[in-house]
Image (cartoon, coloured by chain):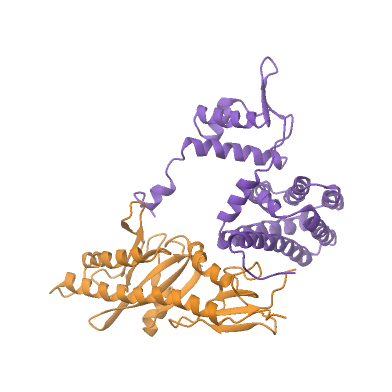
Amino acid sequence: MSDLSGVHSQVFRPLPDVLRADAIVDRLSTAISLGLLRRGEQLPVENQLTAMFGVATATVRDALQTLRNQGIIETRRGRSGGTFIIGSPRPNLDALRERLLNLSMAEIRDMEDEQVATAVAAVRLIIGRAFPHDIDRLERIARAMGDATTTESCMRADSRFQSELAVLSQSERLLATQMRLLTESIEIMWSVLTVESDKEWTMNDHVVIVAALRNRDLLAAERAVHQHISRDFYRLVAARLDVLYPIGPTHE
Amino acid sequence: MSDPIGDLGPAARAIGKWFATIYDDLHIMAESSESELRDSRGTKAVVTERDLRAVQPAAAAFLSSHEIPMAAGIVVGPGVIENKDGSIDFWRRSDSGTTQRIVFNLSPDDPGFYDFVTYEWFAEVVATGKPAIQGPYLDYAGMDKYILTAMVPLSLDGVLIGTAGCDVEVRELERVIMPILRTIPGDAALVSKFDRIILGNSGRFLVGNRVVTLPKDAIRQDVPGPELGLQLVAAPPARHF
């Protein structure tokens, strides 16, 4: 629709600077949590960030200052100076809870749909493209969750497995989609999952996916990724509804 | 041991009561739209597009008394008015508290053509002369949202000329329906007459999915009120895995 006067103008109105700075902080923090940006890595210089994010210099400065105050980045002066990643963000549980409660049932289901679509496409490509040693590698990544002792390390192992699925598909676009999905959902997901009750089945599900891929069994692989993602989202729905509408079905 | 599903009657009645207030007011909106149209047309032979704009107060009145629906108005079929393509006069709330007319593309040759006569909410109501509800569906090229559309027949001088109704975002509907569904101790869902899930009280019944199989001990209950074919389905609570 070409109507930019009313509702549409609301959609496309410029973001306030404060929100943009927050968005940059969130984006960088999540990327660091997921391991997309690594400790020791140097961030692009200020005017590059300004251009890449499409915001004012002051906005980038605000965002960097926030990350500096949180001990996540550090700026060094001198010849080998620059801004470096020095720490991992602590998950902001209040913000994650807020984001979860704000998702509607329809949005949660839609997020699940896109994850299923992406994962099913990935396993289909993997069966056509991966070598046995790729599957070995995927299996090591899947089993690495066994060593995880904290929610954050479970989340990283989960994220690692999911991104490797896209990596083995050999599709750059699929990997980009998968990273976007992980960025928006994996922290919320692990804010409701726990090491004690969810690490085992998550790892088992991943191992089942790997086995189906090893057998080059497309139907089994599709079923396994679908079932795994459904389990994740079943937990997410339960967590949200239990907070918003506490009376409800009791699942033993 | 307590009943694992419980009596669905109270929840069905509560849901039916909410839909009844919506449909009662849609009928009122249709009637006042008809009288606005008649006055605006006056002695002219046909209704013009300009006449249709006269129904805005009826839509605004509906929206001001219901906070869940996002838009309301009337839809007139092709061949009824001066414009051969028909017309959609739907209004939504704007931030300033007034209403704003929504633009639809009704020219068949244009990209983004909104072929409304093929939608259930139009075809069914015009064919049967009875209220109907469609959804949840993605209203592409229309509201571009995931919605339900509630419609009642619209007449002029005793002739059915289209529909009057409202759109409800699934997101907003959740606010009234979920608290009711959550009083049911089993896994339960409100479903459309085609068994498409409108909302469920757990991850077992997700909005948009079809209820294809149910366990033997599942029960169903018609939602009273306007005859829309809505039902509650419920099964003893079980983890999905």
Image quadrant holding the C terminus of chain A, namely bottom right
Residue B19 horizontal side relative to residue B39, left or right: right
Residue A216 on image: x %, y %: 82, 61
Q: Quadrant of residue B50?
A: bottom left
Tell me what residue is drawn at x 18 percent, y 69 percent: B40
Give the number of marks: 0
Q: Quadrant of residue A100?
A: bottom right
- In depth, the one of A212 and B207 nearer the eye is B207
- Which residue is outermost to the left? B43
- In depth, the one of A58 and B86 nearer the eye is A58
Above or below — where is B79 with respect to A52?
below
Residue B210 on image: x %, y %: 60, 74
Residue B57 on image: x %, y %: 26, 65
Chain identifier of the orange chain = B
Tell me what residue is drawn at x 17 percent, y 72 percent: B39
- Which residue is outermost to the front? B1
Tell me what residue is drawn at x 51 percent, y 27 percent: A58
Q: Is residue B103 visible?
A: no
Residue A149 horizontal side relative to residue B138, left or right: right
- In depth, the one of A160 and B96 nearer the eye is B96
Chain identifier of the purple chain = A
- Which residue is outermost to the top? A78
Above or below — where is B10 with respect to B62?
below
Residue B76 horizontal side relative to residue A14, left or right: left
Q: Quadrant of residue B187?
A: bottom right
Q: Is residue B48 visible?
A: yes
Above or below — where is A73 with respect to B182?
above
